Amino acid sequence: MSTTLTSKGQVTIPKQIRDVLSLVPGCQVDFAVNREGDVVIHKASALFHRKPGKPDRFEFARGKADVQWRTDDLMALLRGED
């Protein structure tokens, strides 16, 4: 399957490929060139981009909140409303 390169160097990823990789608008992708010179596309993942041994700065806080805020109460607090 082929596609056309635009003047800006952009291509459309064919639907079959997007479906196989579960790509949706906003997804990040990684490109690589293998030893044979073929371009390989991978769906980017957070773990793939994180440096080995470097913890996710949000992981410690994830799921720790024990206060159940109601949206109206939280917005009033943030806006300084009484």
Image: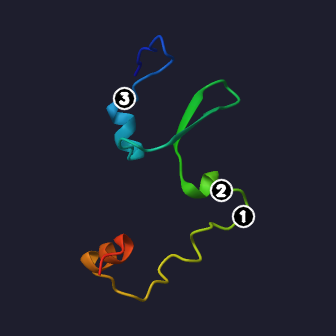
- Mark 2 → mark 3, Cα distance in angstroms: 28 Å
Residue at image coords 53%, 42%: 42
Q: Quadrant of the C terminus?
A: bottom left
| Tags 2 and 1 touching, CB below 8 Å | yes
Q: Mark 1 = which residue?
A: 54
Q: Amino acid at mark 3?
A: Pro
- Which quadrant holds residue 74? bottom left
- Mark 3: secondary structure: loop
Q: Which residue is mark 3?
A: 14
Tell me which corner region of the image, top left, top right, bottom left or bottom right, holds residue 81. Answer: bottom left
Residue 75's disc is none
Three-letter code for the amino acid on which mark 2 is drawn: Arg
Residue at point 56%, 56% (across, down): 46
- Packing grade of label 1 (10 A; few <14, some 14-19, many >=20) is few
Please report whichever mark, 3 or 1, sits nearer to the chain's N-terminal start: 3
Q: Earlier in the sequence, mark 2 or mark 3?
A: 3
Q: CA distance from mark 3 to mark 1?
A: 35 Å
**Residue 78 location, x and y as percent?**
38, 72
- How are the residues colored? rainbow
Front in this rendered view, residue 17 or 43: 43
Q: Which residue is mark 2?
A: 50
Vertical arrangement, residue 14 with respect to residue 46, above or below:
above
Residue 13 on image: x %, y %: 40, 29
